[in-house]
Amino acid sequence: MKPSSSRTVRSNDKFKLIDSDLEGCLVEMFKRFRCPVAVTVDEYQQQAKSASGIIEYTVKRKQTTVTPATPYTESITMKHAQKYPKHIYLAMKAVYNVQHQLVELMITNCQGMIVPRMVIQVLSVIIANYPLLTKFAIKNCCVDQDIIQDLISMLPYSAITDICLDDCKSNNANYGVILKAPTIVKNLSLCRCNISDSECEEIAAMLRYPEFTETHLVTLNLTSNKIGDEGAKCLADALRTNRHLRYLNLADNLIGDEGAIRIFHHLLEFRLTHDENVERRRRFFLYLKKKQEVYADCLKKLALSSIKREHSKKKLMSHTTLTSREGSYQSQYRPKKILKKIKNASQDSTWQNIKADMMAIEILGPFEDPFGTTSFKSINDSPFCVGNFTLSYLNLAYNNLTYQSLKILLNAVEHQMIHSTQKSCGLMKVILDGNRLPVTCEELSTIQQKLKEHVNSFTNRIMKDRTANNC
């Protein structure tokens, strides 16, 4: 029996959909809004993993055809309504997990015309019924800025973190705005989307600290676009402060030595600009100020708790009448008792200060900054950063790199191997196939060998730590 969902959809109209299958929901919603679109849904059901660890799927083809009485009606958003031909056919791929819950959705092969806005708008109405839907793709289709905006409007109501728009022929679409959406986008793929240097600059601007996207985007795939040295420089400048992007694919672009070397330089030790150093100090000052406020609040709570505890102890103490002899005996040692109380009070105060400081650090966490204590160093009274050690995969295959880039890359790889830590593993894989490099090159062989050693060393380090923790 297929599971059902009774979750209320956040929209202008309140819907409760009892059919968790996508095709069933589309039939219901297309009828309600009289959308003149015929959708073919290919359902993929996840099976158990094979011996090689690959998830296998079974395919069940389902056809959903919705043809309204009139060839055209207004879409869900009455403004900016679009007209389409009478017969529109759209292909979708829906992937369900073992529990038959939708986890991935793809729109494909809508060639010859722009994806109908009403389809995205219908999906935005029912998307909240699929809390496990994390991957959404539009492949080999035509899109425009309206489609991008509808997609952005849909994201806050969904659990989508992976977006793929490969092979989407853009009609003045700005892909950078996807990263401006108030949602967590972890993986973004924009292969073969005719992205130029100017569009790449807009994307790179969203990857700089302290932009919202900088803390969430982990993989960025820009394969087979029109990105040159200027676009690569913008991405390189973003890597100065970005400490979350781990995968960057720039294969099959127009990048030369100038752009590649700029990227490699930020994997090495680099000097901070005056503005970067001023901002670093300002952020650290704000952190200390906030920490002091939290510390004072925690100290106040601990003091109140201590007073209440002492008050409770006094209430529980029995009051007995002392004889004059006992009184004279106690009065003889009264100064010692006073000194003992002062000493205990001093110890309690020290303990409260230490505990309040620990509580403040636990609440705020350590000072995390691209130029924090672990990555900042001073050389001859000049501020330096040890480099970006977060990026672990870099693909520059089939560009215009020459032997000149290899020298800088070799220095970067050696630097990363020396200063990498378990938390920041550094560069682990670089792909340079298809560039104008010598067939036999000592530097290239050394780079590949050192990266292989680095991967083995890092893997062994993790295995040792796991073994020690298990013991």
Image (tube, helix red, strand yellow):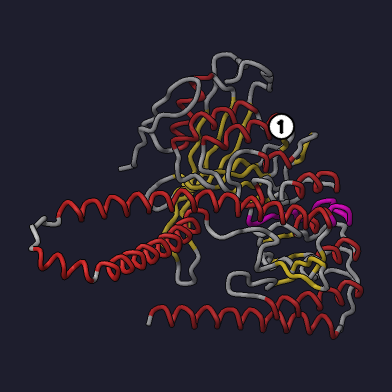
Check the picture and name the quadrant holding the C terminus: bottom left
Label count reads 1
Classify residue 460 as left or right of residue 343. right
- Look at the picture and state if 15 lies above or below 290: above
Classify residue 206 as left or right of residue 132. right
Residue placed at 42% from the left, 38% from the top?
Answer: 21
- Look at the picture and state if 450 lies above or below 425: below
Counting from the top left corner in percent of width and height, residue 265 is at: 82, 67
Check the picture and name the quadrant holding the N terminus: top left
Counting from the top left corner in percent of width and height, residue 204 is at: 76, 50
Q: Identify the residue position indicated by label 1 in the image.
A: 114
- Look at the picture and state if 56 lies above or below 282: below
Q: Nearer the viewer, residue 26 or 429?
A: 429
Residue placed at 72% from the left, 35% from the top?
Answer: 143
Q: Around disc 1, counting alpha carbons within 10 Å, would you say few (fewer than 14), some (14 to 19), or many (20 or more)?
A: some
Figure quadrant of residue 377: bottom right
Residue placed at 52% from the left, 78% from the top?
Answer: 462
Figure quadrant of residue 8: top left
Q: Nearer the viewer, residue 382 or 273?
A: 382
- Look at the picture and state if 377 lies above or below 314: below
- Whether residue 131 appears in magenta in the rendering, the answer is no
Find the magenta span and give its range.
Answer: 218-233
Counting from the top left corner in percent of width and height, residue 20 is at: 40, 37
Q: Secondary structure at mark 1?
A: loop
The kind of residue tagged 1 is Ile
Q: Nearer the viewer, residue 90 or 102?
A: 102
- Whether residue 232 appears in magenta in the rendering, the answer is yes
Counting from the top left corner in percent of width and height, residue 45 is at: 44, 51
